[in-house]
Image (cartoon, grey):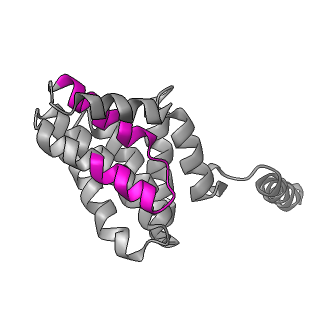
Amino acid sequence: MARPILTFCRNAACAALSVIVPPAWAESPQALLDQANAETRVDPEAARRHAEQALTQLATQPDADQQIRAHVLLCEYHSERDRSAAQSHIDAGRALLPLAQRPGLRAPLATCEGELNEYANDNGRAAALYQEAVTVAEQHGERAGEGRQQAGAVHGTAGSAHGDDALLDLQLVR
């Protein structure tokens, strides 16, 4: 007789705990992406995990803007580790742009693609992508600082005749 009562109590306790302690996936994709963004430079592995968790959730509840954010974070993570994985995230993000509410999300995709080109020593293409990022960000009210910094760095290291422009871009970032 004691056995059914124990089973009932155990099931009731488990049910109560599941209400009190929500599972890890209970965080919204936006919260996961905000967390990943904050962790990008501090704990890249945690940032990657959170961005991947957000993408997993977004597969069942699509939101193009949040999916693009996740792809940007994963592109940034892979940009120095696995060029083809980074490019895959750029491609996936660009494919989602027609569905996005914020067209300015094209800017961080261009910045990440610019980084890939810079790492491949294609500074001309990198500078064009950074400039695209700045232009798009300014047109759509997004942050342009990172694109400007990258463009200034590429112009400066390439010994470009646009060195004055690069310095101006860096000053505008501040």
Residue at 17% across / 46% down in the picture?
84
Residue at 58% across / 47% down in the picture?
34
Residue at 39% across / 30% down in the picture?
170
Looking at the image, residue 3 sits to the left or right of residue 149; the answer is right
Where is residue 30, by image quadrant? Answer: bottom right
Residue 170 in view of the camera: yes
Residue 86 in the image: state x and y as whole percent: 26, 46
Residue 68 in view of the camera: no
Residue 125 in the image: state x and y as whole percent: 14, 45
Q: Is residue 151 magenta?
A: yes
Residue 94 in the image: state x and y as whole percent: 30, 64
Give 142 or 34, whichever is nearer the viewer: 142
Looking at the image, residue 147 sits to the left or right of residue 116; the answer is right
Give 43 or 115, whichever is nearer the viewer: 115
Where is residue 105, by image quadrant? Answer: bottom left
**Residue found farthest to the bottom:** 99
* Main SS category, magenta section: helix
Residue at 89% across / 55% down in the picture?
2
Q: How many marks?
A: 0
Residue 172 in the image: state x and y as whole percent: 45, 36
Instruction: Give the quarter of the figure containing the N terminus.
Output: bottom right
The magenta-colored residue range is 131-157
**Is 129 above or below relative to 59?**
above
